[in-house]
Amino acid sequence: MVTLKEFMEAVGYRITEGSTYGWNCFGPNAYALDSWNGEQDGHSSSIVFDTKTQEVYQVTAYDYTRERAYRLINPAYKEAHDKEGSDRDSNISEAWEDVEYTDLELASDFIEKLAAIVNEEEYDTRVSMPVDFSDEELLTYMKLAHEQDITFNQLIETALREAIARHGITV
C-alpha cells in the first residue's frame, strides 16, 4: 500500500485541506488529506489514513484535464468500503459525473500516475497487475516471447487481454 511519505512526496508536500473521513468503514481514526492545484481543469488527490497507526486506507488521484480518476484501496478494507457504499446506496465506481474510477492494484502504479498528473506529464493509463510465476514458468514464458520476437511484458499483456475477452469483458 502507498505510504504517507510516498503520497506527500508525489504531491510535492502540497496539502490544501484535511478532514475527518466521513464513512465508518476505515474506523474511528480515519482522516483525509487533500491536495488540489487550485484549477477546475487541473488535478487533485487525497489520502485516507489512521491518525493513530498511520495505516493508509485509500488514495485517489483525479486528472480533470484528461477526465481520469484512479483509486487504490487497502485490500484489508476493500470489502468494508464496498459494503458501506452499498449500504449508503452510493455508486462507489463513480469518481464524478460520467467518470468512473480506475481501481489500481499496485502502489507503484498509483504513485507513478499521481506524480505524472501532479507534474502535468503524460503517463501510462494501463493498469499494472501483479503476476507471480515459478522460475520454470518464467523461463517458459520468456522463451515463448523470444520465439514470437516480442517482449515478455507484451506477451503477458496479450495473454491477459485474451483471457479477459474470453470472459466477455471489454478493456
Image (cartoon, rainbow, N blue to C red):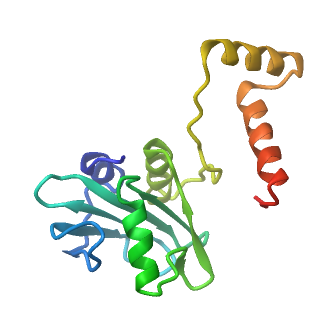
Question: Residue at 43% of width from left, 45% of height from top?
Answer: 107
In x, y percent, where is residue 46?
34, 66
- Can you say whether 136 is above or below 52 in the image? above
**Quadrant location, the C terminus:** bottom right
Question: Is residue 10 visible in the rendered structure shown here?
Answer: yes
Toward the viewer: 66 or 68? 68
Residue 44 visible? no
Q: Is residue 8 left or right of residue 144?
A: left
User: Which residue is painted at 28% across and 53% down in the image?
Assistant: 8
- Quarter assignment of residue 170: bottom right
Instruction: Choose top left, top right, bottom left or bottom right for residue 150.
Output: top right
**Residue 131 as seen in the image, left or right of residue 35:** right
* Residue 64 against residue 103 in the figure, above or below: below
| Residue sticking out furthest to the left | 52
Image coordinates of residue 148 in percent, x first then y, are 89, 22
Query: Whole-percent x and y of residue 52?
Result: 10, 57
Asked whether 138 or 62 is in front, the reply is 138
Tell me the residue at 49%/58% (across/down): 117
The residue sitting at the right extreme is 148
Residue at the image point whose x is 58% and y is 28% from the top: 132
- The x, y position of residue 7, in whole percent, is 32, 52
Counting every numbered tag in the picture gives 0
